[in-house]
Structure formats: structure tokens, C-alpha cells
Image: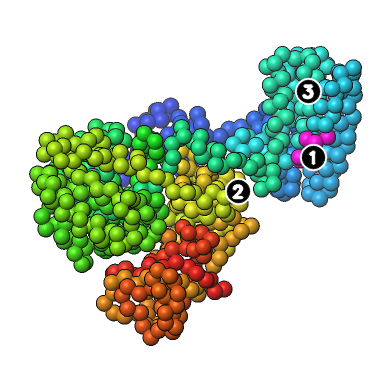
Amino acid sequence: MSRHRNVRGYNYDEDFEDDDVYGQSVEDDYCISPSTAAQFIYSRRDKPATFAEPLEEEYGYEGTDAAADCFTPTHQLTEVDRARLNSCLDQMREVLAESIPEQVMVQAVLDTNFDVQKALNLVLSQGSKQNVKTKNKDAVILAKTTKGKTRDSQSARTESEIVPKITKMTVSGKKQSMGFEVPCALAEENGHPNTPQKGLLPEDASVASAVLEAVSKSTLSPQVVQVSEDQNMVPTPAKKSSKARPQIDVKAELEKRQGGKQLLNLVVIGHVDAGKSTLMGHLLYLLGNVNKRTMHKYEQESKKAGKASFAYAWVLDETGEERERGVTMDVGMTKFETPTKVITLMDAPGHKDFIPNMITGAAQADVAILVVDASRGEFEAGFETGGQTREHGLLVRSLGVTQLAVAVNKMDQVNWQQERFQEITSKLGQFLKQAGFKESDVAYIPTSGLGGENLVTRGQSSDLTQWYKGNCLLEQIDSFKPPQRSVDKPFRLCVADVFKDQGSGFCVTGKIEAGFIQVGERLLAMPPNETCTAKGITLHDEPVDWAAAGDHVSLTLTGMDIIKINVGCVFCDPKEPIKVCTRFRARVLIFNIEVPITKGFPVLLHYQTVSEPATITRLLSVLHKSTGEVTKKKPKFLAKGQNALIELQTQRPVALELYKDFKELGRFMLRYSGSTIAAGVVTEIKE
């Protein structure tokens, strides 16, 4: 115990001299070293608080005599009075914001013996008198300096009449400025002191800047003219109202954008393990979108994980779980360019457990690549009943994709045999024709995703070149025709993801289905029925001022709570909102189903990015497939292959559009127990 007693009773202070800071514990109120604290931390104990210094810092006054005068010996404030003064100033700032200098407010509070109401009245009455004085003074200056220059005086007068109407002086992204700098040449000429004008209201600043501009046209160098013009621009309000905002010619701007390249949304679909991610990952690597260093890292990591052949797939499968399982789970999105187009690539999952994610990706696509595995037995497994090749083909056609490229992958495993290629194309061709694709809109390309053959350049393998003379995959993607964009229709954006941003507000991502948007516009979110403002727009990770139909964008929104928005909400124009309902009628095509559909049948409604439980409440009629005529009213059930009119009821409200008004927003899918049972279009919305 004696040892412990020695340690406990030891006087450590003797080990350190007074000036030695090392080893001493720092003060409790901040956990940084004393030397850093002395350099950066402001302490009231070291320096008595004065109001002159903050004023100098905030407003840039060079000699704040007025502020010093406020605290002459007659106003030696006690701690209590200083607290009362601060409280009064806070209340006054809530009313006046930054429009009145702090020294004026301090003086007013002291003159009125800490009565906020009286101080406010005093300040405002002083401000209005000052306004009148400065306006008269400026009018005299204007008359003197512009005598005989009628054109200049007219322009200055019109500006001084127009500009003072704007009382709020805010410029987005810049610090609010109080008053203005008088250029040296002019200051000397007119006898002004070469200091900022103290106590000027925004109105006075704008009047004076108009005067400055009028004078500068005749007396100053071009550099000073630029200054005065910039100051004239200061009072424009940052908030863009829908009336004041200049309307852009979207179609003309779209043609100019990206150097005249057209935008295309491409989804890659196919059975699980057909090689979709590897094929597109290798394509991106060959195009230079993935650098060699990153690719080398993926190769090393995939070897360690025992999945050496998955290296290219890791370009698009970014999450740890996807890499560990070797299966794409969510839609991976990236961008690349061809000679004439900018492509937004969506890599959809092939596994049947993740079909809802695949539907989300396919609903946002214009064209598709269907990847099939050429290996013996693998193609058959994907194409037969239960395989995803058929289901994916049906889904994309039902969701409005009309152009398709079939990449017959892993052809190197069958030694590029022409017979195998023709066998696959004949089987697929028959099925795709039944699904509704035109033969002219479907192209077949033999490829090797792992080997990189026939992706970016035409195949060099002698086994392939002797019988295949067609396009490589990139040439085929470049030859797709972009669909007609609904730019003229009201704005619509379906939310695919919601996340919190670093700054204020939050972000939503999704594809603009119709219309266009500019920064600063007001938007309405449905079904929550909440309005917000688009503070920023990001397209392909680059900030832009506007975006139009077909763009995959990320919007930064303010003025709304993130809790109220979820995936599946639709942002629209507040003047022309999207319809919201729980009951609607639709025309549906029944796929291959085992159980007949009856009244009260529970289904899962997939609409754009929404996945919502629903019930078929009424079977209205069976329709003729080609003519659309009613062949049977009020059927008892619906069997496979039938075309019918039904009524659906959802559990929660969904935002829908009629198919005839918005083709993109009028389509939906119905699923039941893990398989897609029907595709439909909205014909009538019940309020």
C-alpha cells in the first residue's frame, strides 16, 4: 500500500516550471492546447467587449467614431444594462434585419432607455428623414453633373425611378452589402470622402448607383463604368418569380447542349448470370470511363475474393453485398458517350427476387439491350418458363420500350459458332415478335463480355469475321433513334431516391418524364400535396440551370420536410398538378397465369418507381385484342392472354395520369406471388 500512498500524495506541480505548458491539463471549456487557444479563441476576460470592433468587421467602417461616441463615459454600462441592450438589439434585428447599421440601433436603444418599441419608431423615422435628404442631395448632384446631357439624364432618371422600388438587397451566393463604394476619381471630383457611405438604406444605394452610372458615362474610365453597372445589378432579388423568370426556348437549348449530342436512356436486361454487368463494365473500360488503375484494383480484389471473372462487373456492382454474392441487386446508373449520343446506362438486376428494381429501371428507359447467354443449356434455362429472359422482354415492351438490341454473350465459349447464333436468334425472334417488337427494331449482336470482343470495335476473331459482318455493340447503341420528348407538356418528375444533402434542404433523384424545370421554380409534390422550391439542379454530377424531359436529374429542394417525401412521389407544376386517386379504371393484358383472375384478386401495382398493394375490385368487360371492342360484359374471371377493362383500388393514394394524356405516366404492371401477371394502361381516374 505504501507505493500507492506515495503516488497519491505526490506533488506534480514541482516537476513543471511556471512557463512550461507541456503536460498541463487545459481549461475545461475547450479541449485544445493553450497555445492554440491563445491564438484563435476569443475570450471576454482578456479583452473587454466593445461594440466598435464587431461593427468595423461586419460593415468595413474604417473610423467608427459614431460607434465610439455611443459609449462615452456618460454611458458606462453595467452588466445588467449591457444584457438589456443585447436583448433589445436582438428584437430590433428581427424586425429590421440588416437594413440599419448597428450603431444607429444602439444609440436609439440608449436614447429611449431600453424601450424596444420607442427605439424602433425612432430608428424608422430617422431612416425616412435620411431617405428624403439623400434623395434631394442626389438630385442636386444629378442636376449639376448631367446638365446639357439630356440622354444621360433621362436614362439615369428612369433607372432611379425603377430601381428604388426594390427594397430587399440580396444576391444569391454573395454577402449582403450595405451601402456602396464611391470610385476615387468621382469622390474627389464631387467632394465626397473616400469612404463607404454610412447608414445608407438599400433604396439610397440604388438611387446613388443610378446617379453614379449617369456621371460615369461621361467622366470615368470603362473600368469604373463596369463597377457602377455591377452595383446597379445588385438590388435584383434572388427569388425568381414565375412571371419575372425569363422563359428559355427548351428545344433550341436541347439541340445546343452536349455539343449537339442527343440524350438516350438505355437499360440492360436479361436472365441472371447472362453477363450483363461484365459486358457493360468492359464496354465502359474500353471507352476510357474507367481508368487502368481502378480496373487493376478491381482485378486484384476480385482474385482475392475468389471471383476473378467478376472484375469488370464490379465497375457497375458497387455495393459490398452485390460483390460478395456476385449478383446485381439494384439498378446501377452511369453515363458514357458515343459519337452522336450521350447515354445514361442503367444496369438492371436479372435475379427474379429483384424484378421490382428492374421494373423501376426499365420504366425510365427509352431503349434496351437484352443480354442472353450463348452457352449450351444456359440460354435454354433463361428462355424456358421460369427464366427471366422472357419476363424481362415482356416487361420492357409493356413499359414502352420499342427498340431492342440482343447481345448474344459468351459466344467465345461455343467458339463463335454460326449455327448456335442462328438457333438463338430464331427462337428469340419468334418470342419478341409475339411480345410486340417489330423485326426492324430488333438487332442481334454476337459478343464476348469477358474477352471484350465485338464491343467497341468490330470483332477480330477469324471464327467470327468469316460469317458476321454487322455492327459491334457500340455502333448499334449509337444507331438507336431517340424518342420524342414531351417538352411542351406540364412538368412531371417521378422520385426514384430521396437523400439528405450536406447543405440546407434535401435532394431527390429521378427522370423528368415531361416538361422542363429551371432553378428557383416552385414545385408541387403529390400525393403529399406540399410545395417547395428547386434550389439546384444536377445533371450527370454537374450543376445546371435547367433540365428537360428525358434527363435523369438530382434536384435540391427547400421549403419542405424530407419526411413527407418518399420514393414514388411525383413532382409537378403547381398550376397543372397531377391527379391523385385510390380508384382507377384500366385496360390490361393478362400474361401467362396459372390462377384465373377474379373480383377481389390481390395484386402488387408497379407504376414508375411506385410499388403499391392493390385489389381488383371490378371486372368490367373483356375486349377484342386488335379492335378493342367489348366482347363480353361483366366476366366472372379473366384467363391468360385476355384483354380486359378492370377497376383497381389501392391502399394509399397514388399520383397517376391518363395514358392518352401522358404515355410515359399512364403505364403500369401488376404482379402476384413473384411473377408478372398483367400490363395495363390507365383509362379513367375516379376521384
Up-down: is 352 above or below 136?
Answer: below
Amino acid type assigned to the residue bearing label 3 in the image: Leu
Which residue is tagged 1?
Answer: 165
* Residue 68 in the figure: left or right of residue 565: right
Are there few (<14), some (14-19), or many (20+) residues within 10 Å of tag 2? some
Between residue 105 and residue 239, name the one nearer to us.
239
Name the residue: 35% across, 36% down. 338
The disc labelled 2 sits on which kind of residue? Glu
Q: Position of residue 332 (x, y in %)?
A: 32, 49
Name the residue located 47 percent from the left edge and 68 percent from the top edge.
Answer: 682
**Visible residue check, residue 380:** yes
Q: Real-space Cα distance between discs 2 and 3? A: 34 Å
Quarter holding residue 350: bottom left
**Res 73 → quadrant:** top right
Q: What's the magenta bit mostly, secondary-structure-wise?
A: helix
Residue 477: give x, y in percent of width and height. 33, 42
- Residue 588 is covered by the magenta coloring: no
**Disc 2 to disc 1: CB gap under 8 Å:** no
Residue shown at 60% from the left, 48% from the top: 521
Q: Is residue 321 left or right of residue 82?
A: left
Does 119 appear above or below 524?
above
Q: Quadrant of the C terminus?
A: bottom right
- Circle 2 SS class: loop
Q: Secondary structure at mark 1?
A: helix
Seen at 25% across and 61% down, the residue is 431
**Residue sitting nearer the eye, 79 or 438:** 438
First to last magenta residue range: 161-167
Q: Please tell me the numbered disc located at residue 212.
A: 3
Q: Taking the image as drawn, is residue 268 in sight?
A: no
